[in-house]
Image: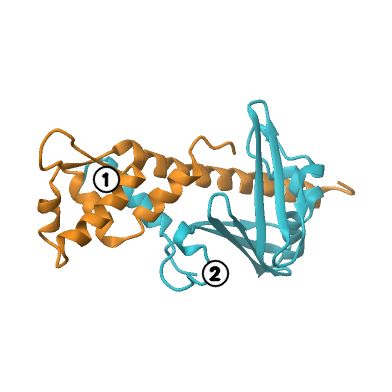
Chain colours: A cyan, B orange
Amino acid sequence: MTDDELVYRRVFAAPRELVWRCLTEPAELAAFWGPRGMVTPIDGIVVELRPGGRFETLMTGEHGSHRMVATFTEVVVPERLAWFEPASGVHTISTLDDLGEGSTAVVICQRQVPEAMRRPEARAGFLSSLDKLAEHLTRLLQGERS
Amino acid sequence: MPTTVEDHQLDALFTALSDRTRRDIVARLSTGEATVKELAEPYAMSMQAVSQHIRVLERSGLISRGRHRQTRPCRLEPAALETALSWIEESRRTWTERMDRLEAHLARLQQGPGR
């Protein structure tokens, strides 16, 4: 993992197998996936747990609905799960780390993959650095020189 | 997470900002407008190459060029930067809140008998 990604880390007081189940079983995903004010009904969730399999969720709320359509790029039970959303070009990689004594660290890395880099043959080179970019843009908006 | 920004616009934005020279040009324009000639000065590259970078930035909406003067100075369009930032902010919020709900859900699962 490099530091040029958007990264979210959280330690959960739960064994890794249980956290994995929550991230991969529709019945569990339905309980927490949708953003605030929206629901993610179980029958709108598709999880084909293998590389190349579909990962889709339909989130509905008062102000409309949002469908996430993604493809799993990596499935390593129970430690690593990655998927790619072609519409937004976002690659999300989740890593589950067993910390012992029934606790698990989950790290979510997101990278915006520029369109030119999405073709499989364009493998080398950069992936846009979202965290640094965010800082950079914030500085620019505040009118400072970087 | 209903998104109000167009994906293709974000594509163009992130592609535009994925290059060091273009980020540098954006940073310089944040202090005021400049002509292509002025922007090209510090770089060891042809005017043509700099013009190419500027066209990419223009297509992404990050910069615009004046119409009336012959030199057509480049200027920054902060609204496009806001678009990129708001996408990043939305992603951050989505995942922070999702982790909160997962935490609560895990606690519920482990609490009592059954679900």
The residue shown at (45%, 61%) is A116
What chain letter is assigned to the residue under label 1?
A
Q: In the drawing, does residue B56 fall left or right of residue A3? A: left
Q: Position of residue A32 (x, y in %)?
A: 71, 44
* Mark found first going from the N terminus, 1 or 2: 2
Quarter of the image for residue A99 reads: bottom right
What secondary structure is found at the residue carrying circle 1? helix
Residue A7 visible in the current orientation: yes
* Residue at the spot of label 2: A120
Q: In the drawing, does residue A85 fall left or right of residue B49? A: right
What chain letter is assigned to the residue under label 2?
A
User: Three-letter amino acid code at disc 1?
Assistant: Leu
Looking at this view, is A87 or B2 the one in front? A87
Quarter of the image for residue A40 reads: top right
Number of the label disc, if any, that sits on residue A140: 1
- Dot 1, how many residues are within 10 Å of its Cα: few (below 14), some (14-19), or many (20+)? many
Looking at this view, is A126 or B57 the one in front? B57
The residue shown at (10%, 58%) is B41
The residue shown at (40%, 43%) is B85
Measured in 3D between alpha carbons, the distance from the residue under mark 1 to the one under mark 2, in whole angstroms, is: 33 Å
- Dot 2, how many residues are within 10 Å of its Cα: few (below 14), some (14-19), or many (20+)? few
What secondary structure is found at the residue carrying circle 2? loop
Q: In the drawing, does residue A85 fall left or right of residue A53? A: left
Residue farthest toward the top in the current orientation of the protein: A62
The residue shown at (34%, 46%) is B59
Looking at this view, is B99 or A146 the one in front? A146
Number of the label disc, if any, that sits on residue B10: none
Q: Position of residue A139 (x, y in %)?
A: 28, 46
